[in-house]
Every structure is written in structure tokens, then in C-alpha cells.
Image (spheres, rainbow, N blue to C red):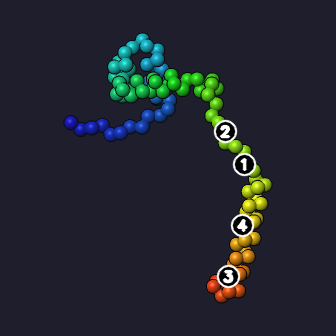
Amino acid sequence: MSKRPRRNHSAGFKAKVALAAVKGDRTVAEIAQQFEVHPTQVTDWRRQLLDRAVDVFGGAQVASEPPIDLKALHAKIGQLTLENDFLEGALTKAGLLSARK
């Protein structure tokens, strides 16, 4: 018995199958047969649809990341650049680093 190659279904297809399962007018086995997927997959997609339905209407807001302080980051970049330049000069004077440029 040969296995069917793995298929990647689009989000639209999954939603279509899950909505058919939510309607409840046919059994999971009938829906699975119609869309040529495994009945367990139909059940999983139905559960995912029901679990995330609240998110469609803004129920669960994802916590946004804290704002980035660009001034502090630019100051840190400047400080690190000065330190690198100082160390490069000190190492060059000590003969441990050949002069670049």
C-alpha cells in the first residue's frame, strides 16, 4: 500500500472544512470523505476554529512589545564606537595590531 504524499492545505481550505464541521448537518466522516482529509484532521481544525473564534472579534489582545528607546540605543552605539576606536589606537601604539586603513 503506497502512502499519499504529504499535503499542505491553505488556511482558506482549513476554514472551509472547519466551518462545514461546525454546521453539524453532516458527520465528521462524511466531511472528511468529501474534502479527502482524515477525520481526525477535520476534528482538529474544527477545535482550532472554535478556540480562536474570539480572536476574530478582538477578544484576546496580544501583548505588544515595549516601545524601543531609539535615543538610548544610538547613545550606546556611539559609546561602543568610541571604545572600539580607543582600543584600536591603543593596540596599534603597543604594536599588537597593524595599522588598518
Residue under label 3: 91
Does residue 68 appear to the left or right of 32 in the view shown? right
* Amino acid tagged 1: Ile
Query: Are the two marked residues, 1 and 3, in contact with CB atoms closer than 8 angstroms?
Result: no
Q: Secondary structure at mark 4?
A: helix
Query: Are the two marked residues, 3 and 4, in contact with CB atoms closer than 8 angstroms?
Result: no
Residue at 54% from the left image edge and 26% from the top image edge: 52
* Amino acid tagged 2: Ser
* Amino acid tagged 4: Leu
Does residue 3 appear to the left or right of 32 in the view shown? left
- Label 1 to label 2, Cα distance in Å? 11 Å
Residue under label 4: 80
- Label 2 to label 4, Cα distance in Å? 29 Å
Residue under label 1: 68
Does residue 29 appear to the left or right of 45 in the view shown? left
Residue at 68% from the left image edge and 86% from the top image edge: 94
Q: Crowdedness of circle 2 by 10 Å Cα count: few (<14), some, many (20+)?
A: few
Find the residue positioned furthest to the left: 1
- Label 4 to label 1, Cα distance in Å? 19 Å
User: Vertically, is 80 above or below 87?
Assistant: above
- In primary-sequence order, the first of circles 3 and 2 is 2
Residue at 42% from the left image edge and 11% from the top image edge: 25
* Res. 57 visible in picture: yes
Residue at 37% from the left image edge and 15% from the top image edge: 27
- Label 3 to label 4, Cα distance in Å? 16 Å
